[in-house]
Amino acid sequence: MPRANRHYIPGYAFIGAGAVVTRNVPDHALVVGNPGKSIGWMCQCGERLTEDLGCLVCKKGYRRSDTGLEELEKEGGNGE
């Protein structure tokens, strides 16, 4: 019996309906199509990020990392 291919789809990644995932997906990626192709980035709140990796809704910012995107720390460091 053939072994099924398995691919990693992390938290906050969005996969479009009908997309065929053929490889691991980066954190926060927006993937659509057949075969699946990353066409952008998504915020934790579910909104698509701008070109500079910022969210217009919740105001979070991100930067690229080895695994996809990671959230920028807020300035001030006191939780505000």
Image (cartoon, grey):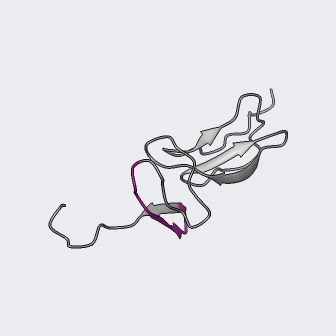
Residue 69 located within the stretch drawn in magenta: no
Q: Is residue 60 above or below residue 34?
A: below
At 44% across and 47% down in the image, what residue appears? 57
Q: Quadrant of the C terminus?
A: bottom left
On the image, which quarter does residue 71 sit in? bottom left
Q: Residue furthest right?
A: 34
Q: Residue at x 67, y 40 (%)?
A: 6
Outermost bottom residue: 76
How many tags in the picture?
0
Residue 55 lies left or right of residue 23; in this view the side is left
Q: Quadrant of the N terminus?
A: top right
The residue at the point 76 percent across, 35 percent down is 19
> Please, is residue 46 above or below residue 61 in the view?
above
| Residue bounds of the magenta highlight | 58-68
In the image shown, does 45 or 19 lie closer to the viewer?
A: 45
Task: Name the spot of residue 39 as percent of width and height, x first.
Answer: 72, 52
Indicate the position of residue 13 as horizontal and vertical percent values. 56, 44
Q: Is residue 78 above or below residue 47?
A: below
Q: Is residue 65 magenta?
A: yes
Q: Nearer the viewer, residue 60 or 25?
A: 60
Residue 74 image offset from top left, x and y in percent: 29, 67
Furthest residue toward front: 56
Left or right, residue 80 beside residue 4: left
18 and 41: which is toward the camera: 41
| Picture coordinates of residue 20, whole percent (x, y) | 78, 36
- From the viewer's perspective, is residue 67 above or below residue 38? below
> Image quadrant of residue 73?
bottom left
